[in-house]
Amino acid sequence: MTIKNRKLQDNGYGPSINEDDSSKLGLEDYRPIDPVPSSKASVKPGPVEHGTPLMPYIPKPSPPPISTIDGLP
């Protein structure tokens, strides 16, 4: 059985090789930045409010009591 090598697809976001000096990098050498979603759940700048838990502890209800059947515990 022969395994063929697969070539990786070029996504076009690698460093540009056309320049003579590799120390000069431009913004086109990096991946584009995804915009921040505009939702109320996004992190907003400002002071941290202490005393308010992010995920409050909500206890689960206790199971129903075990009833005795025919006098068995």
Image (cartoon, rainbow, N blue to C red):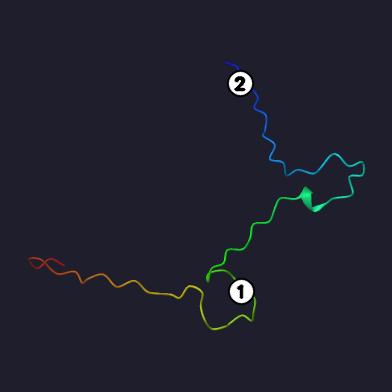
Classify mark 2: residues with Cα within 10 Å, few (<14), some (14-19) or many (20+). Answer: few
Q: Amino acid at mark 2?
A: Ile
In the image, what residue occupies the spot 58% across and 63% down? Answer: 37
Q: Quadrant of residue 60?
A: bottom left
6 lies left or right of 24: left
72 shown above or below 26: below
73 shown above or below 28: below
Q: Considering depth in this image, is 61 or 27 the residue closer to the camera? A: 27
Residue tagged 2:
3
Q: Quadrant of residue 72?
A: bottom left
Question: Quadrant where the C terminus lies?
Answer: bottom left
In the image, what residue occupies the spot 52% across and 81% down? Answer: 52
Pinpoint residue 30: horizontal percent, then vertical percent: 75, 50
Pinpoint residue 61: horizontal percent, then vertical percent: 30, 73
Q: Secondary structure at mark 1?
A: loop
Numbered badge on residue 44: 1
Q: Amino acid at mark 1?
A: Lys
Pinpoint residue 64: horizontal percent, then vertical percent: 22, 71
In the image, what residue occupies the spot 37% across and 74% down? Answer: 59
Q: Earlier in the sequence, mark 1 or mark 2?
A: 2
Q: Secondary structure at mark 2?
A: loop
Pinpoint residue 26: horizontal percent, then vertical percent: 83, 52
Q: Considering depth in this image, is 32 or 23 the residue closer to the camera? A: 32
- What residue occupies the far top of the structure in this picture? 1
Q: Considering depth in this image, is 28 or 44 the residue closer to the camera? A: 28
Question: Quadrant where the N terminus lies?
Answer: top right
- What residue occupies the far right of the structure in this picture? 21
In the image, what residue occupies the spot 65% across and 24% down? Answer: 5
Say which of marks 1 and 2 sits in front. 1
